[in-house]
Image (spheres, helix red, strand yellow):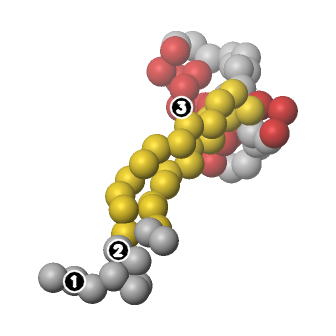
Amino acid sequence: MPTYKIKITETLQKQIEVEASSKEEAIKKTKEQYQNQEIVLNENDYVDTEYSYIEKIKNKNEQIR
């Protein structure tokens, strides 16, 4: 039986409010908080899952010709 490589992409999403003097500063603050694990996304922030075919992998029993 052949083997297939499949990619699973799960999307989590959260909206937060940030006090800042500009949208650029708000994004920078949010990135810093996320990187410092002050903002953590979990199963409650689940939005979607996608499945994509990557490639077929030759079966070990198949001979290469």
Looking at the image, tell me whether mark 3 or mark 2 is earlier in sequence order: 3
Q: Quadrant of residue 9?
A: top right
Left or right? Give the position of 26 relative to 38.
left
Extreme-right residue of the structure: 44
- The residue pinned by badge 1 equals 64
Disc 1 packing (10 Å; few <14; some 14–19; many ≥20): few
- The residue pinned by badge 3 equals 28
The amino acid on which the numbered mark 1 sits, given as a three-letter code, is Ile
- Distance between mark 1 and mark 2 Cα atoms: 9 Å
Viewer-proximal residue, 21 or 27? 27
Q: Position of residue 49 (x, y in %)?
A: 63, 36
* Quarter placement of the C terminus: bottom left
Disc 2 packing (10 Å; few <14; some 14–19; many ≥20): few
Looking at the image, tell me whether mark 1 or mark 2 is earlier in sequence order: 2
The amino acid on which the numbered mark 2 sits, given as a three-letter code, is Lys
Q: Secondary structure at mark 3?
A: helix
Q: Residue at x 74, y 32 (%)?
A: 46
- The residue pinned by badge 2 equals 58
